Amino acid sequence: MTALATVEGWIALLTLTVLEIVLGIDNIIFISILAGRLPKDQRERARKLGLSLAMVIRILLLLTITWVMRLTTPLFTVTAQEISGRDLILIVGGLFLIAKSTHEIHDKLEGEEGHGNARVAASFGAVIVQILLLDVVFSLDSVITAVGMVDSVLIMAVAVVIAVGVMLVSSGAIGEFVDRHPTVKMLALSFLILIGVSLLGEGFDQHIPKGYIYFAMGFSIFVEMINLRVRAKGAPVHLHQPYKE
């Protein structure tokens, strides 16, 4: 507990908690989208279970911190590019995110016609397995980020628990909001493709500054909030309205 007995420790805890919440937003969105494929009476349980699994995985990774850090050791080389265990997980996770998000977008756009009418609802177990796979990817990235910021495992564990607690409280509202607004869901899926590309780049040691990604996401959300506000007021948007003096 000595790590939390200093002002520096509490500042580190606050900073890391905020960072964990920010890094967890994409996890919440993905869990909400996957849970949205389930019957309404199962969605909340899937969201809570998915986030609880994320917390358990992150804490387990923190407790095996030595193993996590060894994941940066190169395993093999592809066209002069060294691939470590971390890189491999990020590449597979990025490809999975891109493929899954693209499938969801196609299903959303084409599912109303043709073979889309025969779509079978996802099972609870299948959704949880998909959430678990992505939890591993997001948790690994989050833990490695935490290790680079803080030396105390206790501070990292407390920050993870607090962050997941905040996400558990807000996940229901976020999920319902995404379900009510199809355009927001489409935007969220586009974000997941962007995150997938970012993970893929990180896996090949092509670092994409997170600031660029968050700015693009933030600006898109700002524009979408304006669109939602306009639609809520029932006012049509005229992009080519003639100028009147």
Image (cartoon, rainbow, N blue to C red):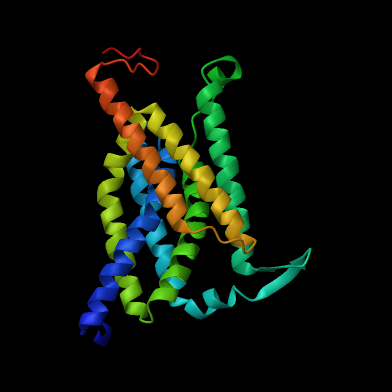
- Single out the residue that lies furthest toward the bottom: 2
In the shown orientation, is residue 212 left or right of residue 118? left
- On the image, the x and y values in percent for residue 151 come to 38, 81
Residue at x 35% of width, y 12% of height: 242
Task: Give the x, y percent position of residue 194.
Answer: 52, 46
Q: Quadrant of residue 124?
A: top left
Residue at image point 35% right, 32% down: 224
User: Which quarter of the image is occupied by the N terminus?
Assistant: bottom left
Question: Looking at the picture, does residue 162 appear above or below residue 233?
Answer: below
Q: Quadrant of residue 45?
A: top left
- Residue 141 visible in the picture: yes
| Left or right: 194 in relation to 217 | right
Q: Nearer the viewer, residue 194 or 119?
A: 194
Quadrant including the C terminus: top left
The answer to which of 94 and 175 lies nearer the viewer is 94
Image x and y of residue 87, in percent: 62, 64
**Does 120 sit left or right of 142 as displayed?**
right
Residue positioned 32% across, 27% down in the render: 227
Judge whether residue 40 can be spotted in this image: no
Q: Quadrant of residue 150?
A: bottom left
- Could you tell me which residue is drawn at 27 percent across and 63 percent down? 162
